[in-house]
């Protein structure tokens, strides 16, 4: 198996780790890609990114009122 952040994963394809990665574990290596999309553009002065590790999704919200979304952003 493969060890990542103190957790042992089995050989083969790992659909989702606790840290929101999709991985492949072989006898010689482990390669992973983040499931989180990366925000390409958002108003960094007035907005911030909140990551939800249970759903592996992120939200761009207003810094001064996190209950409100920032509407003008794009993801890649």
Image (cartoon, rainbow, N blue to C red):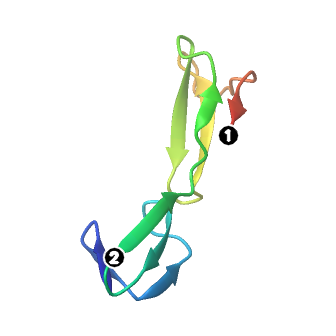
Say above or below: 73 vs 24: above
Say above or below: 27 vs 14: below
Callout 1: SS:
loop
Residue at position x 45%, y 64% in the image: 32
Residue 72 at x, y percent in the picture = 74, 21
- Which residue is situated farthest in the front direction here? 28
Residue 18 at x, y percent in the picture = 43, 66
Disc 2 versus disc 1: distance between alpha carbons? 27 Å
User: For residue 65, which quarter of the picture?
Assistant: top right
Quadrant containing the C terminus in the rendered view: top right
Question: Residue 51 or 36: which is nearer the viewer?
Answer: 36
Residue at position x 46%, y 69% in the image: 17
Residue at position x 53%, y 70% in the image: 16
Q: Which residue is mark 1?
A: 76
Mark 2 or 1: in front is: 2
Crowding near the residue tagged with mark 2, few <14, some 14–19, many ≥20 C-alpha atoms within 10 Å: few
Crowding near the residue tagged with mark 1, few <14, some 14–19, many ≥20 C-alpha atoms within 10 Å: few
Question: Residue 27 or 6: which is nearer the viewer?
Answer: 27
Residue at position x 42%, y 68% in the image: 31
Question: Residue 24 or 71: which is nearer the viewer?
Answer: 24
- Circles 2, 1 touching at the beta carbon (< 8 Å): no
Residue 18: give its label.
Answer: none
Residue 39 at x, y percent in the picture = 61, 34
74 to the left or right of 61: right
- Which residue is situated farthest in the top direction here? 45
User: For residue 30, which quarter of the picture?
Assistant: bottom left
Give whichever of discs 2 and 1 has the lower sequence position: 2
Residue 74 at x, y percent in the picture = 72, 30
Q: Which residue is mark 2?
A: 29
């Amino acid at each position: 198996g493969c060890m990542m952040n103190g957790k042992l994963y089995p050989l083969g394809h790992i659909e989702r780790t606790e840290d929101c990665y999709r991985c492949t574990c072989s006898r010689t290596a482990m390669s992973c890609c983040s499931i989180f999309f990366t925000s390409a553009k958002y108003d960094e002065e007035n907005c911030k990114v909140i990551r939800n590790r249970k759903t592996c999704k992120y939200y761009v919200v207003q810094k001064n009122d996190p209950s409100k979304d920032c509407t003008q952003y794009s993801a890649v």
